[in-house]
């Protein structure tokens, strides 16, 4: 019997976060990121996309995907949004045979703790229930949160959200 894996992605041209959960044990099997920071400034988007694709293909060989969960992008700056969606296209193509679910960032934050939470607070909340997981960057913790959102929403795991202190509801001063 082959294992089933859930992939959580926080996609980016600069550093893509990838978290993979074993759906049999409901434990994280891999938490990593794919950085393109080693490329020279003159590197094209195509070169970076090919590198991201190749790195994901290497992961695919060890962890056959069952379902893909992706943090939905947002449109803030037109050019950067267009660039990010190129990475989405690569992932959509690579996993064309697998169900893909998109969650907005606010939905992810709400599932983990609260919709207006900072990235740091989401990461701290995750560490309370997964103290042994080490995140090298925010992209990794974001991908972990995306994967957890699916597990929580589909009641595959029990998740204890922190109690909200009404005096600390705001995340910005």
Image (cartoon, rainbow, N blue to C red):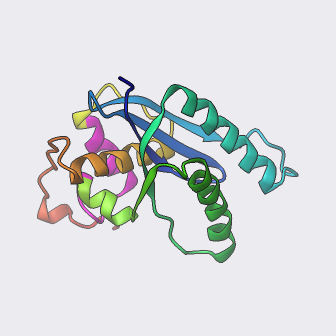
65 part of magenta stretch: no
Q: Splitting the image into 4 quarters, where does residue 108 fall?
A: bottom left
Q: Splitting the image into 4 quarters, where does residue 3 fall?
A: top left
**Residue 127: x, y in percent?**
29, 36
Whether residue 117 is visible here, answered yes or no, is no
Q: Main secondary structure of the magenta part?
A: helix
Q: Work out which quarter of the rendered image holds the N terminus and state it.
A: top left
- Residue 61 located left or right of residue 86: left
Q: Please tell me which residue is depicted at 44% across the width and 34% down the height of the picture.
A: 135
Question: Which of the two residues, 63 or 160, is positioned nearer the viewer here?
Answer: 63
Q: Is residue 37 above or below residue 61?
A: below
Q: Work out which quarter of the rendered image holds the C terminus and state it.
A: bottom left
**Residue 26: x, y in percent?**
27, 32
**Residue 29: x, y in percent?**
40, 27
Question: Which of the two residues, 58 or 121, is positioned nearer the viewer here?
Answer: 58
Q: Please tell me which residue is depicted at 48% across the width and 30% down the height of the picture.
A: 63
Question: Which of the two residues, 170 or 31, is positioned nearer the viewer here?
Answer: 31
Q: Please tell me which residue is depicted at 14% across the width and 45% down the height of the picture.
A: 160
Q: Which residues are magenta?
A: 112-127
């Amino acid at each position: 019997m082959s294992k089933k894996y859930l992939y959580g992605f926080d996609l980016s041209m600069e550093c893509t976060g990838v978290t993979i959960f074993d759906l049999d044990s409901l434990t994280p099997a891999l938490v990593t990121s794919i950085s393109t920071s080693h490329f020279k400034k003159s590197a094209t988007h195509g070169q970076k996309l090919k590198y991201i694709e190749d790195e994901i293909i290497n992961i695919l060989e060890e962890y056959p995907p069952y379902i893909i969960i992706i943090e939905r992008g947002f449109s803030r700056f037109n050019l950067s949004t267009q660039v990010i969606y190129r990475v989405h296209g690569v992932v959509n193509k690579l996993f064309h045979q697998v169900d893909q679910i998109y969650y907005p960032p606010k939905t992810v934050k709400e599932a983990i703790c609260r919709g207006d939470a900072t990235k740091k607070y989401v990461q701290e909340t995750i560490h309370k229930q997964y103290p042994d997981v080490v995140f090298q960057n925010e992209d990794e913790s974001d991908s972990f949160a995306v994967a957890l959102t699916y597990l929580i929403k589909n009641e595959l795991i029990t998740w204890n959200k922190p109690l909200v202190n009404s005096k600390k509801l705001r995340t910005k001063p």
